[in-house]
Image (cartoon, rainbow, N blue to C red):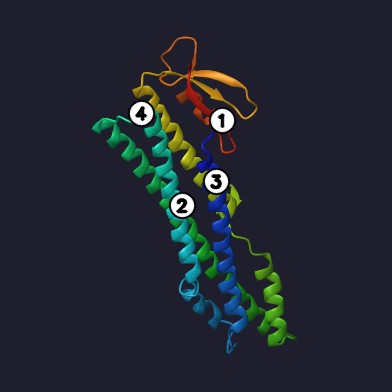
Amino acid sequence: MLPGVINDTAISAREKYQAFLDTVQGAVLNRVNSTDWADARTLWSMALYLGQLNPQGRILYEDLRLACSNAVAAIRDIALEIKADLSEEERRVLDGLGASAIGEINQILLNCFTRDSESGYQVLRKYAITADMILSAKGNNKSQALILAKRQILNHHKFTQSDRAGRQWGSAHFVYVAIRMKLLDLYIDTLSYIYAKTGNDLVVVTFSNDKKEVFSLSGVTPGYRSLVEERKHVFHPRSEAYFEPVR
C-alpha cells in the first residue's frame, strides 16, 4: 500500500496550515478591535508589524518544515529496506533526491506563508481605506463606518493560493495537495531508482480499486506501457496507487 507517511504528513500539513491562517486572522482582528482610532488610515500602517504580532505562526511554520523533512527521511528508509547495501553512488543519488524534495517543499511553504501573511496586511489596508471612505461620506459617523467596513471587507476575506494554471484554491487545501504531490513524486523517484538498481524493470501498480497493471520502469520492455509516460495519469493528486516489483 502507499506509505502512510505521505497521506499522514499531507493531512498534518493541512491542519497546521489552517492553524497558521487562524493566527493571521486573529492578528488582523486583534489590530481592528484594539486600535484607538485617531484616523482610519493609521490601521494599515500598523499591519506592517503583522509578522511580529504572529509569533505562533512562525512556530507552526517551523513545525511544518520539520514534519516534511521527517517524511522525506522516512521515504529514504523505505529504499534502504529494499536495498540495504547501497553503493556510494546510490547514496549520493538518494541524498540528491531527498535534498531536492526538501528544497522544493520549503520553497512552497515559504511562498504560501509569505503570501498569506501579506494577504493579512492587504485586508487590513482595504479595511482601513474602506472605513475612511465611508466615514467621509455624508451621514456616517465613526462607529457606522467601522461596522460597514468590517461587514464589507473582513467578513468576506478568504486566504487563497493560485496554481500554475491560475486556478484559485483555499490555502490550506493548496498546501495539502502540494505537499502530498511532492512526497508522492519523491516516493516514485526513489523506488523507481532502487528497483532499477536491483534489476527490476517490470513493476505492478495497484490502484485504489484493487485493479492491477504491470508497467515498465524504463519503457523498453516490449508489451508493457512505460510508467514514466503514464506517471501523471497513474499518480494524480488523489491517487492511492502504489507499485512494487513483479514477483
Along the polypeptide, which appears first: circle 2 or circle 3?
3
Q: What amino acid is labelled 2 in the image?
A: Ala
Along the polypeptide, which appears first: circle 3 or circle 4?
3
Along the polypeptide, which appears first: circle 1 or circle 2?
2
Residue to which mark 4 is pinned: 83
Please indicate whether residue 95 sits to the left or right of residue 183 in the image: left
Along the polypeptide, which appears first: circle 4 or circle 1?
4
C-beta proximity under 8 Å, tags 2 and 4? no
Residue to which mark 2 is pinned: 67
Residue to which mark 1 is pinned: 241
* Above or below: residue 69 compared with residue 197: below
**Residue positioned most to the left:** 88
Seen from the viewer's position, the closer of residues 195 and 219 is: 195
Seen from the viewer's position, the closer of residues 160 and 3 is: 3
| Residue 210 visible within the image | yes
Along the polypeptide, which appears first: circle 2 or circle 4?
2
Which numbered mark, 2 or 4, is in the foreground of this view?
4
Point out the image quarter for the N terminus: top right
Query: Which residue is drawn at the image coordinates 49% and 19% (left, top)?
Result: 215
Which numbered mark, 3 or 4, is in the foreground of this view?
4
Q: Residues within 10 Å of mark 3 (few under 14, many from 20)?
A: few
Q: What amino acid is labelled 4 in the image?
A: Lys
Residue to which mark 3 is pinned: 8
Query: Which residue is drawn at the image coordinates 59% and 68% (left, top)?
Result: 25
Please indicate whether residue 194 sits to the left or right of residue 206 in the image: left
Spatial CA distance of label 2 from label 3 is 10 Å
